[in-house]
Image (tube, helix red, strand yellow):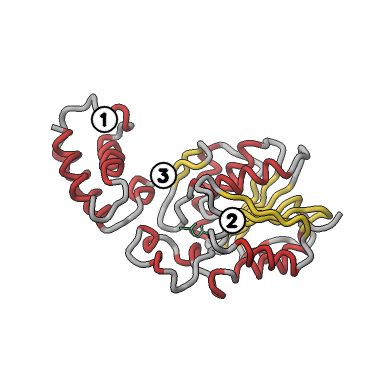
Amino acid sequence: MLTAILQRATLALTPTSDSPRLDAEVLLSHALACNRSQLRLKTTLTDTQLSLFQALVTRRQQRIPIAYLIGQKEFWSLMLMITPAVLVPRPETELLVETVLHLISHKEAHIADLGTGSGAIALALVSERLNWRVTATDLSQAALDIAIQNATHLQLHHLTFKLGSWTDAFAPNDRFDAIVSNPPYLAMDDPYLVNTDISHEPVSALVADNQGLAAYQTITTHAINFLKPGGYLCFEHGATQAACVRAILQHHAFVTITTLKDLAGLDRVTYGHIRL
Ligand code: GLN
């Protein structure tokens, strides 16, 4: 019986989803409050579960991201609460976490995550380095509320959350070993913004002026005042933006500028450090 329901939902989701079968299974698991591996043991649905599932499928047909429909998304093996107030964490952003963990070797580092959204990067960092302190900022109080709830729920400490635009949220004497950010980087006219799942995500987390480069320019200009000698600035960026992000870092006297590729082989992270 569930097989037929799943097949019907898969068919219904095929025109608008890249992963219709997986989506159908995740939504059905959510409606049944079980995990995906338990699904095949289920044989019946109550009327309430069926109508919940059908409502979820209808919303998924409108390209609402799965993470918003089920209210969560896994990142760096942490299950995060996700709402439409925050960008859905992407797997490629894990490269930014790996990069910071690799670059900073001292035990008691102080890191900043600018535009933290759900808190994904900041939470992943403190989950790996229990002695680090991470300051996470966001312009959106609604986003910070989600990040704070995630930190509380995951019982992760050593985090400070600050409201404000990029480095404006810092105190004048804040100095960091690394500043990290996955800022908005899509251009306003990026065709990817229309008729895809991301049209439901906060535009302020996706789109930036200057062909998507504005946040890199602003952050780099100010980051220099808040880094310790030798401190790193690490960015996630779009696959075609490495040269521009490198040029911005170079212009502000960052050195040893390095670009790393994500698992799909696309340029995704660029970092540099200020001189010792
Ligand atoms: N990574 C987003 C996407 O490609 C773009 C914006 C961002 O993550 N900062 O959908």
Q: Which mark sits nearer the N-terminus, 3 or 1?
A: 1
Residue 266, horizontal then vertical, whole percent: 54, 53
The verdict on label 2 being within 8 Å of ligand 1 is: yes
Instruction: Please give the label number shown on residue 236.
Output: 2
Q: Are marks 3 and 1 in contact (CB under 8 Å)?
A: no
Write the residue at 51% across / 36% down: 77
Instruction: Assign the C terminus to one quadrant of the image.
Output: bottom right
Density class for disc 3 (Cα within 10 Å; few <14, some 14-19, many ≥20) is some
Residue type indicated by callout 1: Leu
Whether residue 179 appears in this view of the structure is no
Density class for disc 2 (Cα within 10 Å; few <14, some 14-19, many ≥20) is many
Give the camera-side residue of 67 and 242: 242
Residue type indicated by callout 2: Glu
Instruction: Please give the label number shown on residue 39.
Output: 1
Farthest top residue in view: 41
Instruction: Please give the label number shown on residue 11.
Output: none
Residue 86, horizontal then vertical, whole percent: 47, 56
Residue type indicated by callout 3: Gln
Q: How far is disc 3 from disc 1 in space, using C-alphas?
A: 19 Å
Side of 2 relative to 131 (left or right): left
Write the residue at 45% across / 52% down: 88
Side of 218 relative to 41 (left or right): right
| Numbered disc 2: secondary structure | strand
Q: Which mark sits nearer the N-terminus, 3 or 2?
A: 3
Q: How far is disc 3 from disc 2 in space, using C-alphas?
A: 22 Å
Pointer 3 residue: 72
Compared to residue 46, the image places residue 223 above or below, namely below
